[in-house]
Amino acid sequence: MGKKNKRYSKEFKQDSVNYYYSSGKSIKESASDLNISPSGLSGWINSAKSNEGVVNHRGSGNHGSDAEKEIARLKKELRDKEDALDIFKKAIGILNED
């Protein structure tokens, strides 16, 4: 069985780190309680340590900057438009067949 790629909200990550610190449990025990991987929790804890206690969350897509996020959005929009154009071309081809 393969692992499923889960995405967690910023709030969940922060709450998980706060739970770890307040519970007095190990990372492994805390992760088990929260039904997440110990390595994921550990990464969030390290992120919080290096960011004044706040978990760094970049959102889905993991774009490093707003510019990269905008580029990815525009590329997706272009792909969608190209797909629509291909469909229209095929439809015209079908309608012109007599």
Image (cartoon, helix red, strand yellow):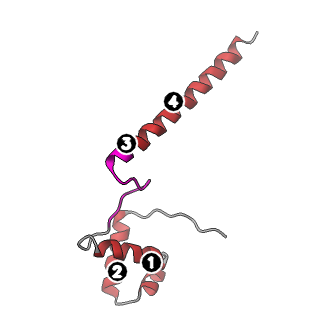
The amino acid type of the residue labelled 1 equals Leu
Q: CA distance from mark 1 to mark 2?
A: 9 Å
Of tags 4 and 1, the one toward the viewer is: 4
Q: Which residues are magenta?
A: 56-69
Q: Are marks 1 and 2 in contact (CB under 8 Å)?
A: yes
Q: Which mark is residue 70?
A: 3
In this view, 40 is above or below 96: below
Q: In this figure, which residue is indicated by the disc labeled 2? A: 19
- Name the dominant secondary structure of the magenta segment: loop
**Rendered residue at 52%/35% (across/down):** 79
Among the two numbered marks 3 and 1 on one chain, the one whose residue lies closer to the N terminus: 1
Task: Please tell me the numbered disc located at residue 81.
Answer: 4
Asked if disc 3 and disc 1 are in contact, CB closer than 8 Å, the reply is: no
In the image, which is nearer the foreground, mark 2 or mark 4? 4
Q: Check disc 3 and give the amino acid type.
A: Glu
Q: Earlier in the sequence, mark 2 or mark 3?
A: 2
Left or right position of 79 against 63 = right
Local packing at callout 1 (Cα closer than 10 Å; few below 14, some 14-19, many 20+) is some
Q: Residues within 10 Å of mark 2 (few under 14, many from 20)?
A: some
| For marks 1 and 2 on the same chain, the one whose residue lies earlier in the sequence | 2
Distance of label 3 from label 4 (alpha carbons): 16 Å
Residue on which disc 1 sits: 34
Residue 73 coordinates in the image, percent (x, y): 42, 41
Would you identify the image quadrant in which residue 94 lies? top right
